[in-house]
Amino acid sequence: TAPGAAGGLPAVQQMIAEGHSINVTLIFGLDRYAEVIEAYLAGLEANEGDDLSGVSSVASFFVSRLDTEVDRRLDALGTEAAAALKGKAAVAQAQCAYQLFLDRFSGPRWEALAARGARVQRPLWASTSTKNPDYPDTLYVDELIGPRSVNTMPDATLEAYEDHGALERRVDADPDAARATLDRLAELGVDMADVTRVLEDEGVASFSKSFDELLGVLGDKAEQLRQG
């Protein structure tokens, strides 16, 4: 696993070039996602192997946290137009990300890699539990179903989907509507670039804290073994 933050992208490209399979995580915005795809493609192109079929990757796009942050900003605006867009941003952006996936994994550049056995880097929808109880508990599953994608559902969301989820391909059913939603947010003054920057900074800080805690636990155990 490697973070999809800017600092992690050279490592992603290098690992793919060396033939490692990578989960590129903590992706919150479309611009960063485009960079993640580029790192994967460039890594494949730099791979000297004749058969690329052993290299795989997913791009983990975090979903529900986006609505949490955007909804906070919409509430601050306090208008009817803002209220009407609550709970819409995350699905719209993920659906636009899927269009980016379809675009980048087609055409001559990709076909040259596919001829060497390359596999697409599948979009993975992460953070798909619904944080706002006013929203359907399968919102981030029902609206993001499509070929060659992954959804990592926590147990409660999986159980809810098994009970009343809608099995229908919807992730690319209306890409124009998804883009229009993002355009309306921009018109209201919601800066999606700033939203994704805030979320990425928070995500990296959280991952760093967890990593430091893990190192601390391992260090304590190593010391206990030395003393024992």
Image (cartoon, grey):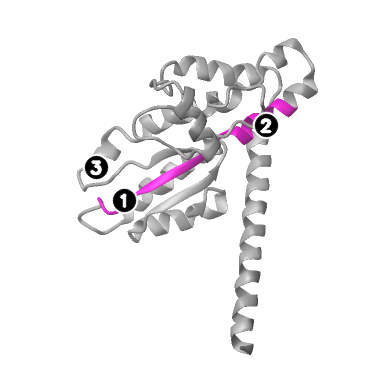
Residue under circle 1?
45
Residue at 24% x, 42% y: name it: 114
| SS assignment at label 3 | helix
| Residue 54 falls inside the magenta stretch | yes
Q: Which mark is residue 68?
A: 2
- Name the residue type under label 3: Ala
How dense is the environment of label 3, judged by Cα within 10 Å: few (below 14), some, or many (20 and up)? some
| 162 up-or-down from 221: above or below | above
Position in image of residue 220 (x %, y %): 65, 76
Q: CA distance from mark 2 to mark 1?
A: 38 Å
Between discs 2 and 1, the one toward the N terminus: 1
- Name the residue type under label 1: Glu
State which region is magenta: 53-72
Task: Report the mark closest to the observer, 2 or 1.
Answer: 2
Place residue 134 in its image quadrant: top right
Task: Report the mark closest to the observer, 3 or 1.
Answer: 3
Q: Nearer the viewer, residue 185 or 59?
A: 59
